[in-house]
Image (tube, grey):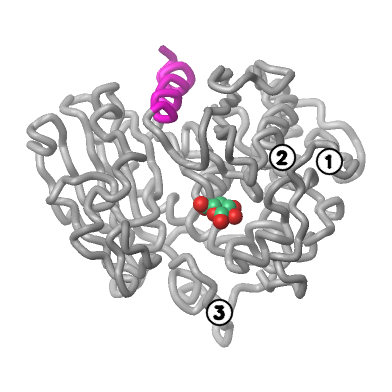
Amino acid sequence: AMSSTLPAQQEKVIYDEAEIPNFTLPDPLVAEDGTKVESAQAWNEKQRPYLMGLFEREVYGKAPAAPEKISYKVIETSDEALDGTARRRQVAIQLTDDPDGPVLNVLIYLPNTDKPVPTFMTLNFYGNASIHDDPAIQLPESWLRNNKDKGVENHQATEKIRGSSKGRWPVEMILEKGYGLATAYYGDIDPDFDDDFQNGIHPYFYAEGQTRPKPDEWGSIAAWAWGLGRAMDYLEQNPEIASDKVVVMGHSRLGKTSLWAGATDPRFAAVISNNSGCGGAALSRRRFGESVQRINTSFPHWFNDNFTQYNHNEDACPVDQHELIALIAPRPCLVCSAEEDRWADPHGEFLSAKYASPVYRLLGVEGLAAEKMPAVDEPVLSRLGYVIRAGGHDVKPIDWQRYMEFADAHVLGK
Ligand code: GTR
């Protein structure tokens, strides 16, 4: 999206409920012509496609269809991974019909069982090798954000990248609970910086003469979400995976991405967003913490160009983020906040789940089982769930414990 002229640093950030402007949220159950949406059929056939079209046009941008054929190469496998406790698969998925085009490298760990494994699909920030010390994991080859501590120099991975984010990835704990973990580096799909969409996946889909996405076409979040769909194409081909039990989870910008992936791709059985904030689970109209103007200025490539119309002008947007969660209904969705991550507006994330609930109920399932913001570390694990953890913007083992408790109940039906 194009940047606004107001420098982001000059924005006053709202961190006080009393300073939130008055606003009226759009009702997900009121149709374009003002009539009430009263049946699951009316929702599925008319209202849902209408809202989906609005999010595509005004917020994330429309992504292209999946490539015609699914092509992938199994790069490496082991049935003796992690000291014999797990199976490891490394697969390169071709993202376009062009065999020389970009590939998404997916790393999969599965517990030792002969049954199809329910699996978390999660993009990562620093390459697959960053999630675990396992020396067999391939180093990422795509552009990475420089970070010496994480083992990135000159935008390239060094050996030091191995395990550098492992605190966020309790792989052994996930496998012990009977889940698989599939992960891929988001930069394989589109490097996370503003280059006018010259690198990454976008140019492969330009029409003749086109040099950047149109105002209603995909930004980077939509591209990452689309890439998750390509990973899902592969997971569906692999009989080791219970492909009807794949939970898409993401943190922060990748939490925004997991919500959009879940909304656009019904194959994801459940959706978890962690600390996703503005443009994710948080209501834009509250303008609490990160605002639409701020995010479009700091990250002009995340959303589509149309979304910049709502800088300092959130009320004009025909949708707000509770309707993004409504697009996931009736599938399970867990919204996760962190107490100190006020930039992501925990209360606004809670309210999104609350105001998506009428759609869940219309579709015959339970909505969020809380009317008021729950206390810190008192998870509300209803089918549409919400949890606020103590601490800051991060993913911790306790978060994963809650994801699995949630998935046990709503994906495995335990
Ligand atoms: C911040 C951004 C947030 C969130 C976060 C992250 O700088 O303002 O919207 O996405 O980055 O992804 O870690």
Q: Which residues are magenta?
A: 398-414
Q: CA distance from mark 2 to mark 3?
A: 31 Å
Q: Nearer the viewer, residue 23 or 331?
A: 23
Q: Disc 3 designates what residue?
A: 207
Q: CA distance from mark 1 to mark 2?
A: 8 Å
Q: Nearer the viewer, residue 90 or 341?
A: 341
The answer, for residue 31, to whether it is visible in the render is no
Residue 26: give its label. 1
Q: Disc 2 designates what residue?
A: 323
Q: Nearer the viewer, residue 299 or 121?
A: 299
**Residue 373 placement (x, y as % from top left):** 69, 23
Whichever of labels 1 and 2 marks the residue nearer the N terminus, that label is: 1
Question: Crowdedness of circle 3 by 10 Å Cα count: few (<14), some, many (20+)?
Answer: few
**Secondary element at tag 1:** loop
| Mark 3 or 1: the one toward you | 1
Q: In the rendered structure, are the residues bearing label 2 and label 3 in contact, judged by CB atoms less than 8 Å apart?
A: no
Residue at 88% x, 44% y is 21
Q: Which SS type dominates the magenta stretch?
A: helix
**Residue 395 placement (x, y as % from top left):** 43, 38
Whichever of labels 2 and 3 marks the residue nearer the N terminus, that label is: 3
Question: Crowdedness of circle 1 by 10 Å Cα count: few (<14), some, many (20+)?
Answer: some
Screen quadrant of the N terminus: bottom right
Residue at 65% x, 50% y is 279
The answer, for residue 39, to whether it is visible in the render is yes
Q: In the rendered structure, are the residues bearing label 3 and label 1 in contact, judged by CB atoms less than 8 Å apart?
A: no
Q: Is residue 5 above or below residue 343?
A: below
**Secondary element at tag 3:** loop
